[in-house]
Image (spheres, rainbow, N blue to C red):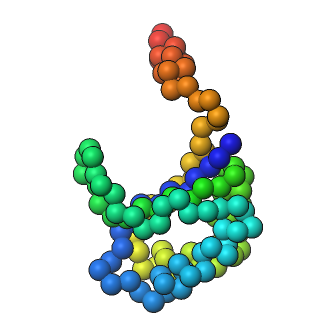
Amino acid sequence: MTAYALAHLHPPATLHEEVFTYMERIQATLDPFGGRFLVHGSVPEVMEGPLDGAYVLIEFPDMDNAKRWYESDGYQAILPMRTDHMKGTAVLLPGVPEGYDPAATAAAFRTAQTP
């Protein structure tokens, strides 16, 4: 099942040189784990609620590859180039299986919360 790395970043007005180096080197860390950018540094068009910053969304074949990428020596070596100069939050998210039915999920949640 597909998995995603999602980052909500708050870049400063002027990016530090190390952030550019991080950006130049990140793809090489993704390649061994099948990672590919779906969104990179996009500023959202907010439809509901307050939100600021920029977003990055990276797709992986599965959660195992996403975790292995994040924990890899290659990525850990460049990660401080971003985190030392830019605030943000990063998460790994499992996707949903083919044929996912949100109504079935609602029914399961409803059943689980009914005493």
Q: Position of residue 18 (x, y in %)?
A: 49, 86
- Screen quadrant of the N terminus: top right
Q: Position of residue 80 (x, y in %)?
A: 54, 78
Tell me the residue at 36%/73% (across/down). 11
Tell me the residue at 42%/68% (across/down). 41
Q: Position of residue 96 (x, y in %)?
A: 60, 37
Vertical side of 56 occupied by 75: above or below: below
Residue farthest to the bottom? 17
Vertical side of 65 occupied by 94: above or below: above
* Residue 85 visible at all: yes
Residue farthest to the top? 115
Tell me the residue at 33%/77% (across/down). 12
Residue farthest to the right? 32
How many marks on residues?
A: 0
Residue 53 quadrant: bottom left
* Residue 76 visible at all: no
| Front position in the image: 65 or 46 | 46
Tell me the residue at 53%/78% (across/down). 23
In the image, 32: left or right of 30? right
Vertical side of 90 occupied by 93: above or below: above
